[in-house]
């Protein structure tokens, strides 16, 4: 077994709780000298001591461990984008990510600021648009990116909203068969809001929810399902009853745009709606009972497939955790419109995707659930479940949207899922080798590589043609003289 060192992490957590080495030693039943050696990485972290440390610091040290792989790939991508960079050794990146994660995240913040400054400089130099437009182009990240990172930093779990929604569901006795009727009555009786179901217009955009605060009416399309309209009612209820909490949570985000704050507030209201329709304890118990069978959960709670998948990615309440899932939604062009995670979705954080990933294969089999054991370059394996979903507005010729929804978890949790049946979870060679996108993937012989890995020197040889494109690091064999 490889020796494990975590000196910097232990020291950081100790200092955050304002503990001396002597105080930490007493709490763990160890000597001060032993703690000093641990923090200096002069002594490895044994399993018994690791368990004591985790018991004392709770989820903090576990989250540091969990984020390590994602931080490594983020740092690799950042350094690869620097001009003239020859690459930083993977061992050095791993050391930073695993022992000094705060430093790693600070480096990423600096890299983001560098990119923004470069974009702004390029826009101004090229004279793109007005001065105001050029400044806006490079002055800050896009609003949806800030909101995505806001939820990522919370591990896609907002405890305050989850608890408030669950209390409300229990108070009013909502059950899967009566949520829409119960919410309609609640909105009318407690908030004087009347529901009006409208016919979709013959042309033009369709509002899924339109609240008029003057007339106190909530317009919902009659063509939508009971679960879809219940979700919109619950979202409106969040704005009416949880305004102070939404403002506080939004205020905790480091947003640089008013648009970002507005999007975050809507995202939090949607989170509350999902938690109200699928109360935490009841949903987790049913998910565990059904071995996370998504179709059965859809039938039980009477909501859509995507809604169930999204809710499964939020089940991280301390003391009552579900499987830590990744949730993604992509379109046919490969654009990722949603990506949320209860743990580290590291190969998507860098902005790249892999054509060998089964989420893209789902478009070839509409409506069918596909499974895949996928192995990343760092040898971590994951179980992925992928299926297409279609959002329609009703009626022939009306606009619709199609996506592939992916739900994944580390293979160590796969035996809790019905989808692991018939899969060989223990055979690493049976997993599909995928990567985090060609720019950062270091698989040297991938036949699907679209372009070279950033920061790695290509091997160019006009005398040799290879099946794999953009081969890197190949050294030709020494020439041999021909016999006379």
Image: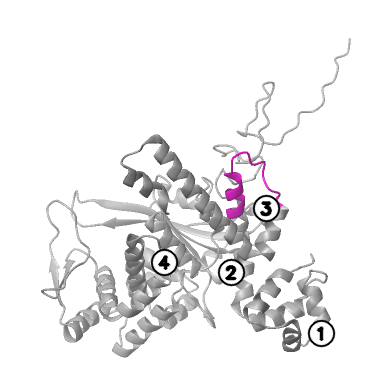
Residue at image point 25% right, 74% down = 236
Q: Which mark is residue 413?
A: 2
* Residue 160: image location, x then y, percent: 41, 80
Give the secondary structure at mark 3.
Answer: helix
Span of residues in magenta: 74-90
* Residue 170: image location, x then y, percent: 34, 88
Residue located beneath label 4 in the image: 310
Between label 2 and label 3, give the one nearer the viewer.
2
Q: Callout 1: few (<14), some (14-19), or many (20+) C-alpha neighbours within 10 Å?
A: some
Give the secondary structure at mark 2.
Answer: helix
* Measured Cα–Cα span from mark 2 to mark 3: 19 Å
* Label 2 or label 4, whichever comes before in sequence order: 4
Q: In front: 373, or 116?
A: 116
State yes or no: discs 2 and 3 in contact (Cβ < 8 Å). no
* Measured Cα–Cα span from mark 3 to mark 4: 30 Å
**Is 392 on the left or on the right of 334, as rendered?**
left
* Measured Cα–Cα span from mark 1 to mark 4: 46 Å
Residue located beneath label 3 in the image: 429
* Label 1 or label 4, whichever comes before in sequence order: 1
Give the secondary structure at mark 4.
Answer: helix
Which of the 4 quarters of the picture holds residue 98? bottom right
């Amino acid at each position: 077994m490889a020796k494990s060192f975590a000196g910097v992490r232990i020291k950081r957590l100790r200092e955050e709780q304002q503990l001396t080495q002597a105080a930490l030693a007493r709490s763990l039943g160890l000597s001060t000298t032993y703690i000093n050696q641990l923090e200096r990485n002069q002594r490895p972290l044994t399993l018994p001591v690791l368990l004591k440390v985790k018991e004392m610091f709770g989820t903090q040290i576990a989250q540091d461990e969990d984020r390590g792989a994602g931080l490594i790939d983020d740092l690799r991508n950042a350094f690869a984008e620097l001009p003239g960079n020859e690459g930083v050794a993977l061992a050095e990146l791993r050391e930073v990510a695993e022992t000094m994660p705060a430093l790693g995240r600070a480096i990423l913040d600096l890299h983001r600021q560098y990119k923004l400054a470069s974009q702004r400089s390029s826009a101004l130099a090229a004279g793109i648009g007005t001065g105001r437009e050029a400044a806006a182009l490079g002055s800050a990240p896009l609003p949806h990116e800030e909101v995505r990172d806001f939820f990522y930093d919370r591990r896609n779990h907002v405890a305050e909203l989850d608890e408030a929604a669950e209390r409300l569901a229990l108070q009013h006795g909502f059950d899967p068969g009566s949520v829409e009727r119960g919410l309609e009555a609640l909105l009318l009786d407690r908030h004087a809001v009347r529901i009006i179901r409208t016919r979709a217009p013959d042309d033009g955009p369709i509002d899924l929810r339109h609240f008029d605060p003057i007339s106190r009416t909530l317009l919902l399309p009659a063509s939508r399902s009971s679960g879809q309209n219940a979700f919109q009612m619950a979202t409106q209820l969040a704005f009416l009853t949880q305004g102070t909490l939404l403002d506080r949570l939004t205020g905790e985000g480091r947003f640089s745009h008013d648009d970002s704050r507005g999007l975050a507030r809507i995202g939090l209201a949607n989170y509350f709606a999902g938690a109200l329709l699928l109360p935490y304890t009841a949903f987790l118990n049913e998910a565990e009972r059904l071995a996370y069978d998504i179709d059965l959960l859809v039938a039980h709670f009477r909501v859509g497939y995507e809604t169930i998948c999204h809710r499964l990615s939020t089940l991280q309440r301390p003391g009552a955790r579900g499987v830590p899932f990744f949730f993604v939604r992509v379109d046919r062009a490969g654009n990722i419109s949603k990506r949320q995670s209860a743990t580290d979705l590291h190969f998507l954080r860098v902005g790249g995707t892999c054509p060998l990933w089964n989420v893209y294969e789902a478009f070839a089999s509409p409506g069918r659930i596909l499974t895949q054991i996928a192995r990343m370059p760092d040898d971590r394996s994951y179980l992925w479940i992928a299926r297409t979903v279609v959002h329609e507005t009703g009626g022939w010729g009306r606009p619709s949207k199609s996506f592939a929804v992916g739900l994944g978890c580390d293979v160590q949790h796969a035996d809790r899922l019905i989808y692991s049946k018939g899969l060989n979870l223990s055979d690493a060679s049976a997993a599909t080798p995928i990567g985090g996108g060609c720019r950062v993937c270091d698989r040297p012989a991938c036949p699907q590589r679209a372009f070279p890995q950033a920061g790695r020197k290509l091997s160019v040889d006009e005398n040799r043609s290879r099946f794999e494109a953009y081969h890197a690091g190949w050294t030709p064999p020494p020439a041999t003289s021909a016999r006379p």
